[in-house]
């Protein structure tokens, strides 16, 4: 029990400053504004409670240069926490489950690619860039598929909680992308935060760009990526 | 009309009493078999982790089903099957347990399981459970798997008929399948068949659960889907899979005890759904996905997790009605059980995987992660998945407190 308390005690920069706390709140507010959410309107207590699980994911992301946290998340728990606002809304409104599945299937397929190549569900495993060329290609395709999938989960009626969840999905994709950028043969030393910043910009560009693609093309990309990664690791 | 309270008829108390005795006996036996299985009467009685855990689960299920003599008979038959070290006892127990069901379709299930075990005995050098490995072949395995699939709800899933879920029959089916690990190791084809059957069952059932309009029907399908996931966990043929199957069955029982369909507070309903990290449902769903990942079947791990997400959605869609205190209490028990999962893994589930070790492969184990939660390790002792239930819950509370403080401060400003 003392290990757990110690880890929580040492996690205060992560909780208060980066990647959680202040920086997460700022990022969520900025992203929500981009999505057209008026923050003052969304101060309903249910929405605020729904915001907590995705905020928890943002806090626990193993992003550089944050100090490591002993009790990290895995991809399965991350998916659940990030999907919580949508699941809660869908359950309350008794939305057609096919809508939810249609929305999340491409990103789930991309998650399969990540898990297949890294051989772990652990989020920190996403930071391990594969050593062999074929898995590297599969992993790169998986990253693209993840961002394409992220563009499909954008809610048509966004609120603070769904915006936080959408940002969380994009930020999970930033993990393998930053690992990929780190592995590039760039002359000179680039700081960890610089790579994360570049990854976030690239991630946002791909996600916003993919938003203009028809739904069937997104499915095609996700399906083809899954197939290609299967062949790559096979 | 008299205002005096009517005495509860003894006939309806007796089945509950029987169920409580079975459950308490199971708990007592768990204390006895922590180190090694208990063999009594030259092997006629074989009490191991599977027998003790299933007795606890069967007793708890007995408390959730309408009282009847058939149920007492089924519990007795299940106990015979569980405690028998002889294949005939195992076959007879499974057969009688299913023959006592009101639904005739389950007779086929019992016949399949009994035929499977009798065929193993006939082909083996010995009828004793421990020495019958030579009799295990594909025909006996297929018969047993078919019996288990029917017991869990295979016919209903294919036939599109709506009928209530029978948890005791499903428990008999899954236990019969798990007991095969005491006979001997499975080959890859059998594992694949079990994984395929379990996944198909879980996917079919979860789709029916999530698209059902009536809450009772959705609940039946939801419980079938949980049992299907348990079959997937069994098919992993690893200590992690066996532990996951145990956790899923525990979650199933807790959900039945809570009976959220009869009316529940939203917070209790979500806790019983498995959506809240740290609850027993969450840990159970995570463990089966982690077991698949530890066995290096990544696609299955994500498919299983998708089923779990849909199960949570199906459960969430049916949270309604008047608030019942019972579901709130059971939701707190689910939270307690989930947070105590490291302890449950050590005391309740480790004997299960240890005593079935002979038939299992070493590709994956679920270990306590201090007090924070559970950890799944693959064959090379690398981390395959993590579930920091307590740490996550503490962090969510801390972030919630911070957000609340910031809001108060903003209002003050």
Image: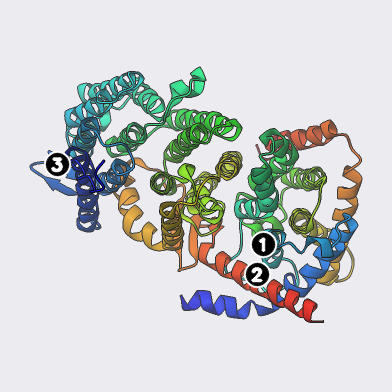
Residue B121 percent across, percent down from the top left: 21, 25
From the image, tell me which residue sits under label 2: B400
Dot label at residue B148: none
Q: In screen coordinates, is A179 left or right of B294?
A: right
Q: Nearer the viewer, residue B289 or A31?
A: A31
Q: Is residue B19 shown to the viewer in this render?
A: yes
From the image, tell me which residue sits under label 3: B45
Residue A28 percent across, percent down from the top left: 80, 63
Q: In screen coordinates, is B303 left or right of B406?
A: left
Q: Nearer the viewer, residue B330 or B359?
A: B330
Q: Chain of mark 3?
A: B
Q: Chain of mark 2?
A: B
Q: Nearer the viewer, residue B196 or B281?
A: B281
Q: In screen coordinates, is B269 left or right of A110?
A: left
Q: Residues within 10 Å of mark 2 (few under 14, many from 20)?
A: some
Residue A58 percent across, percent down from the top left: 72, 63
Q: Quadrant of the N terminus of chain B?
A: top left
Furthest residue in direction front, as rendered:
B1
Q: Residue at x 48, y 28 (%)?
A: B197
Task: State which quadrant residue B122 falls in.
Answer: top left
Task: State which quadrant residue B184 falls in.
Answer: top left
Q: Quadrant of the C terminus of chain B?
A: bottom right
Q: Are marks 1 and 3 in contact (CB under 8 Å)?
A: no
Q: Nearer the viewer, residue A107 or A83?
A: A83
Q: Is residue A7 above or below residue B58?
A: below
Sequence-earlier tag: 2 or 3: 3
Q: Residue at x 47, y 46 (%)?
A: B260
Real-space CA distance between mark 1 and mark 3, rounded to the nearest whole angstrom: 53 Å
| Local secondary structure at mark 1 | helix
Labels 1 and 2 share a subunit: no
Q: Are marks 1 and 2 in contact (CB under 8 Å)?
A: yes
Dot label at residue A49: 1
């Amino acid at each position: 029990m003392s290990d757990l308390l110690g880890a929580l005690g040492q996690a205060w920069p992560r909780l208060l400053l980066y990647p959680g706390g202040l920086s997460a709140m700022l990022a969520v507010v900025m992203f929500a504004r981009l999505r057209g959410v008026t923050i003052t309107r969304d101060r309903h207590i249910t929405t605020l409670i729904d915001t907590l699980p995705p905020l928890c994911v943002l806090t626990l992301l193993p992003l550089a240069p944050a100090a490591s946290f002993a009790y990290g998340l895995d991809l399965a728990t991350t998916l659940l926490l990030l999907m919580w606002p949508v699941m809660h809304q869908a359950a309350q409104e008794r939305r057609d489950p096919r809508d939810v599945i249609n929305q999340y299937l491409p990103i789930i397929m991309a998650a399969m690619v990540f898990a297949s190549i890294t051989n772990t569900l652990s989020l920190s495993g996403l930071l391990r860039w594969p050593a062999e060329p074929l898995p590297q290609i599969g992993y790169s395709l998986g990253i693209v598929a993840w961002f394409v999938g992220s563009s499909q989960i954008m809610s048509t009626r966004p609120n603070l909680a769904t915006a936080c969840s959408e940002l969380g999905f994009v930020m999970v994709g930033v993990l393998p992308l930053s690992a990929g950028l780190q592995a590039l043969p760039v002359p000179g030393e680039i700081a960890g935060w610089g790579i994360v910043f570049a990854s976030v910009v690239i991630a946002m560009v791909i996600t916003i760009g993919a938003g203009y693609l028809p739904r069937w093309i997104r499915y095609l990309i996700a399906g083809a990526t899954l197939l290609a990664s299967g062949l790559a690791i096979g | 009309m008299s205002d005096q309270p009517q005495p509860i008829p003894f006939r309806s108390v007796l089945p509950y009493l029987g169920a409580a005795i079975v459950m308490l006996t199971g708990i007592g036996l768990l204390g006895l078999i922590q180190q090694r299985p208990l063999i009594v009467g030259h092997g006629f009685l074989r009490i191991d982790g599977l027998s003790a855990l299933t007795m606890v689960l069967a007793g708890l299920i007995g408390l959730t089903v309408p009282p009847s003599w058939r149920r007492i008979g089924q519990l007795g038959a299940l106990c015979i099957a569980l405690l028998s070290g002889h294949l005939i006892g195992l076959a007879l127990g499974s057969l009688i347990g299913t023959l006592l069901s009101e639904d005739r379709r389950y007779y086929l299930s019992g016949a399949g399981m009994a035929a499977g075990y009798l065929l193993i005995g006939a082909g083996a050098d010995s009828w004793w459970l421990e020495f019958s490995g030579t009799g295990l072949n594909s025909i006996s395995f297929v018969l047993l798997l078919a019996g288990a699939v029917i017991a869990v709800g295979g016919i209903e899933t294919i036939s599109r008929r709506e009928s209530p879920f029978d948890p005791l029959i499903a428990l008999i089916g899954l236990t019969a399948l798990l007991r095969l690990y005491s006979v001997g190791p499975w080959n890859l084809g059998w594992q694949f068949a079990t994984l395929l059957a379990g996944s198909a069952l879980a996917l079919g059932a979860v789709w029916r659960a999530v698209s059902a309009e009536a809450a009772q029907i959705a609940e039946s399908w939801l419980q079938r889907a949980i049992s299907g996931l348990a079959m997937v966990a069994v098919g992993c043929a690893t200590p992690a899979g066996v532990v996951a199957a145990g956790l899923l069955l525990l979650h199933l029982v807790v959900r039945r005890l809570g009976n959220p369909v009869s009316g529940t507070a939203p917070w209790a309903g979500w806790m019983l759904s498995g959506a809240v990290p740290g609850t027993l449902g969450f840990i159970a769903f995570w463990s089966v996905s982690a077991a698949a990942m530890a066995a290096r079947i990544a696609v299955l791990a994500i498919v299983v997790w998708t089923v779990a997400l849909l199960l949570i959605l199906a459960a969430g869609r049916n949270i309604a009605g008047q608030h019942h205190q019972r579901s709130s209490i059971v939701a707190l028990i689910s939270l307690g059980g989930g947070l105590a999962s490291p302890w449950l893994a050590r005391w309740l589930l480790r004997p299960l995987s240890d005593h079935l070790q002979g038939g299992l492969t070493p590709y994956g184990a679920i270990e306590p992660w201090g007090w924070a939660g559970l950890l799944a390790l693959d064959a090379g002792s690398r981390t395959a998945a993590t579930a920091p239930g307590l740490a996550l819950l503490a962090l969510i509370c801390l972030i919630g407190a911070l957000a609340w403080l910031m809001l108060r401060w903003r209002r003050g400003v």
